[in-house]
Amino acid sequence: MTNDGQGAAAPRLNETLKAALEQRFGERFSVSHGVREHHGRDESIYPLTLPEGVVFAESTEDVVDLVKLCRAHHCPIVPWGAGSSIEGQLLAIRGGITLDMSRMNRIVSVAAEDLLVTVQAGVTRKQLNQELHDTGLFFPIDPGADASIGGMASTRASGTNAVRYGTMRENVLALTVVTAEGKVVHTGTHARKSSAGYDLTRLFVGAEGTLGIITEVTLRLHPLPEAVSAAVVNFPSAEQAVNVVIQAIQLGVPLARCEFLDPPAIRAINAYSKMDLREGYTLFFEFHGSPAGVAEQVELVQQLAADEGGTDFAWAEKPEERTRLWNARHDAYFAGLQMRPGARAISTDTCVPISRLAASVEGARKLLEASGFPSLIVGHVGDGNFHCLILVDVDNPDEVARAEALNREIVSLALSLGGTCTGEHGIGLHKMDFLETEAGAEGVALMARIKAALDPEGLFNPGKMLR
Amino acid sequence: MTNDGQGAAAPRLNETLKAALEQRFGERFSVSHGVREHHGRDESIYPLTLPEGVVFAESTEDVVDLVKLCRAHHCPIVPWGAGSSIEGQLLAIRGGITLDMSRMNRIVSVAAEDLLVTVQAGVTRKQLNQELHDTGLFFPIDPGADASIGGMASTRASGTNAVRYGTMRENVLALTVVTAEGKVVHTGTHARKSSAGYDLTRLFVGAEGTLGIITEVTLRLHPLPEAVSAAVVNFPSAEQAVNVVIQAIQLGVPLARCEFLDPPAIRAINAYSKMDLREGYTLFFEFHGSPAGVAEQVELVQQLAADEGGTDFAWAEKPEERTRLWNARHDAYFAGLQMRPGARAISTDTCVPISRLAASVEGARKLLEASGFPSLIVGHVGDGNFHCLILVDVDNPDEVARAEALNREIVSLALSLGGTCTGEHGIGLHKMDFLETEAGAEGVALMARIKAALDPEGLFNPGKMLR
């Protein structure tokens, strides 16, 4: 496990810059060990990597001034939302300042009649949905962690609802971004679609903070469905479970959620979330629509499941039952970590065309079994996206090397099936080799040109995504 | 009406390049007046602008070789699909070669089980749907003209179905692109979502051929709906019609199509398409879903329409009736041209947030009425997007100037309401001022940096979108 120079970074925060940051940001600039340590780790397996200082922004103007000051001193800036990235995106491997956006947590405006909301980048997804509570609208995108909206935009995140409502790619309508020159750019408008120029919004979405710093995000919202129904179904094999998903997608069933969990995942969430689900290959479904529409979807999926040997249909009709089910699903990552106390997790994130999903899951399952690692599989299979959690002792280099080799095999299989190395987690430090394989040398060369054009001095999150 | 130097372009096709193109492309390279004239005009009001030569590509390799030859001689290349752009995108205003993609009209592969198809860029949307006929799938995006898929990707086109199925932004999954260096880049994979690196796919979608030449496109397909129903409803005023649309969108009704036509538009299509629709403010609806789902949507929209004074509900239940209705809608542009024989049309293309749609349509309608120009309004109002067709005598400079001033007023109104100057037509030659207002100087500066990074010599479609 290399960290591309982490720990070895030459100091970038010189005394002049330090004094200037102190003057501009006062207590909101910190070089204390505790604050730096809090910003020195994400959910990846990389070791603690301290930034040289941390600035807490409260406005776009703060970010502009920070960029101008850091630029004058060639000092890197790493934007930080909720600390929940899992590919090392947040680590200040080249030193410099971590820009903590968590105090930019204001809902700027709700335009309920346009199904839109504008938020500061540090707002988290749960906070947003709480604040939308009385509008009859919701924001569907739900990675496991309570991530920040800016972070979710930056990794092009998705979650359990993407099969129906899309990812951050489809749900970010406009952005406020601070450029490497310290200018403020507003991308997009409040219109649902536009053909006006290059799609800057979607260039910054998924750029992992390497092209500009997102300070505000305008999101599409969705009406709360009139009727909701959730179900849990068991299957004799992973393949049979996945076959039901493939057929439902091909038939155009508008599944709202469709999650796969293997027996170790069920075991882990039973223990962690005090559930009593049967330990089998399991699908969690959720259906949204009118009462009649939901009834139709349920009937069709129930028939498909029965044809593939599905059993033990259990319904979660009440809101509190559904909340419990989906909270357990969202906590699967943390539940998995408890399978091997003290271990950390490498999570694969492959996504394949739906017809190759059974081959991809079955192939991954066999590789995991052969490896002997404690592991589990969960995933947003309606999108063709699933995660293998491989639990490793990060103090054992041989074990880490074997786990990384296993990860590579699972990714190689997905790429050979027409898939991607990352459905929703991003590249960060961890998947740069895979990006080169997937996008090709020419694709990566184009990305590098864009990076050089927008951030010629390599100020923003250097050393991530591109070498 | 300026054409940014058209006609005044210095020759870029020198004798050496000409000889090289003759040798490489034989009869597929032409400098004949007839062929050049055929490529010298689109559906905009700009005058005939001849390229110096035309190359007909049959493969990605043809495009690579053309780019390498032209690059060596600093000769511009303007990609050309079906000739249906309406903002001057296809005009070779800086001279050079027009690259006709219409012979690249092969369906490369259909992956019906993944709801995907890969086509060469010259395939048209109607050809594609004919070839998909036996798959139970369809490609929903339908600009009025039978445009090429490469051209539709390049203008980020949409059409009547976008309210339900999205635009080219949402439906292009992967591209093959030839870069300005003559390299072949494959963007995206066949997975439905990805967080792997910068979103090159969505950078080339909407780039109007200025960043690279799209040679193949992988598109998402959709299952043909089980049930379809279409309806025509009349309203006493534009505002009442639009209010129904606003309410339906806010309630989350999954409208498949929702088109507005004003009385002059109805008059025009009655005459052109031999219809006998009542001349009023009219909505065309289409509903897709299961039989029960469609029945629910119909009931709800009928109620909303009745509450706003909607009358004369007419149903088009049979496929042939629906085809006739939608063909008439698609021909509205050509029908409009007949309102003033010999005239050409300036089409606005504003798109606003749904809550501002009534203000935007009513404002535009008043401006049109006050202008005295023959005009009509049609639009994809479910997206907040509508077109005012202003019929002008292009030989009368005063009239053209007045029409352009009217266009500017309608766009300014939309921008002031949080909208965009172009929902689906693109910038081309015609909307560069509007782009600067909408995206701001900093936004346009970022776009210019991207252009310079990917096409430093300005080889691809020079003089379009960006100055």
Image (cartoon, coloured by chain):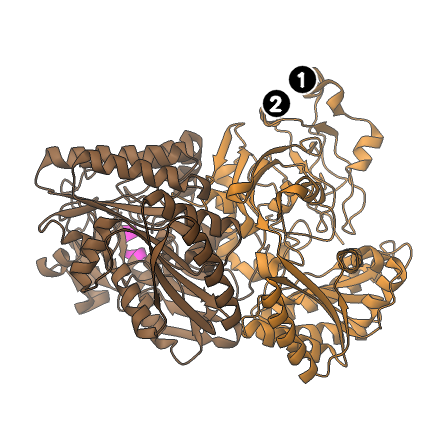
Chain colours: A orange, B brown
Up-down: is B353 above or below B327? above
Q: Nearer the viewer, residue B359 or A106?
A: B359
Whether pointer 2 and pointer 1 mark residues with C-beta atoms closer than 8 Å, the reply is yes
Q: Quadrant of residue B118?
A: bottom left
Question: In the image, which disc is placed on residue A24?
Answer: 1
* SS under mark 2: helix
Query: Which quarter of the image is occupied by the C terminus of chain B?
Result: top left
* Callout 1 amino acid: Arg
Q: Nearer the viewer, mark 2 or mark 1?
A: 1
**Magenta stretch encompasses residue B222:** no
Q: Position of residue B304 (x, y in %)?
A: 45, 52
| Residue of label 2 | A69
Q: Is residue A204 left or right of residue A258?
A: left
Q: Do tags 2 and 1 sit on the same chain? A: yes
Q: Nearer the viewer, residue A51 or B91?
A: B91
Magenta stretch: give its range.
B67-72
Question: In the image, which disc is placed on residue A169?
Answer: none
* Callout 2 amino acid: Leu
Q: Position of residue B320 (x, y in %)?
A: 30, 74
